[in-house]
Amino acid sequence: MTFSFITPEPRPILSLFSKLWLTLIGSVFFVLLLVNLLIIYKNYSLATNTKDLFAEQTSLSEKIVHADEVWATLTTRISAATDIYTSNTLLKKSLHNLFDIVPDSITLEEVLMQKNSLIIRGTTPTKDVFNQLLATPLKSIFSTSNTSFYQTKNGWYGFISTNKIDNSEGYNE
């Protein structure tokens, strides 16, 4: 005896509605898993990039310190070069002025200029010519001026004039 007008069919374990929900949940799970893997990759990439940038920052900091040291060295060298150039210019002018005050009748054989002294060797026709034309300007420039004369074979006088200045302000070594 059958109480149903249709023949019974086997009932599926999951209904169409359940299959739809399970597919939706699986696809959402898969998408979230991909997003999670993407976030993990990005974190790893940022960590690696951060380490690289930190190493680069350290390297650049060392280069900056080195550049500052080089700059300080160059600044010191420029100052020294400027001082030497100024000193050389003053020395050149002093030598030019010295040769300007030497009269034509006096012949210079050697000029030795040091930081605060000047030694001149040469010949002069007479002691008076030297004393009047060269000794007076030298005495006005230097604080101590000594001259010794000796007779040469041709009748002229050889001289060695040692001139010293007490203070050496304005001169560089």
Image (cartoon, helix red, strand yellow):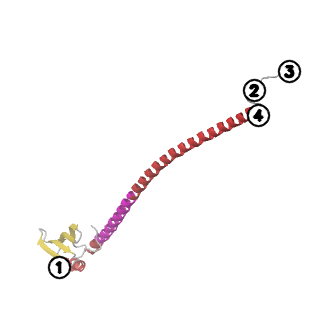
Q: Is residue 69 above or below residue 53?
A: below
Q: Quadrant of residue 115?
A: bottom left
> From which residue to which does the magenta span run?
69-96
Residues under labels 2 and 1: Cα distance? 143 Å
Residues under labels 3 and 4: Cα distance? 30 Å
Residue to which mark 3 is pinned: 2
Residues under labels 3 and 2: Cα distance? 22 Å
**Residue 145 falls left or right of residue 64:** left
Q: Nearer the viewer, mark 3 or mark 2?
A: 3
Q: Residue at x 54, y 46 (%)?
A: 46
Magenta highlight on residue 125:
no
Q: Earlier in the sequence, mark 3 or mark 4?
A: 3
**Residue 24: image x %, image y %?**
71, 36
Residue to which mark 2 is pinned: 12
Residue most extreme to the top: 1
Q: Label 4's element?
A: helix
Residue to which mark 4 is pinned: 17
Q: Quadrant of residue 64?
A: bottom left
Q: Earlier in the sequence, mark 4 or mark 1?
A: 4
Q: Earlier in the sequence, mark 1 or mark 3?
A: 3
Q: Earlier in the sequence, mark 2 or mark 1?
A: 2
Q: Label 3's element?
A: loop
Magenta highlight on residue 78:
yes
Camera-nearest residue between 124 and 101? 101
**Residue 41 falls left or right of residue 78:** right
Q: Earlier in the sequence, mark 3 or mark 2?
A: 3
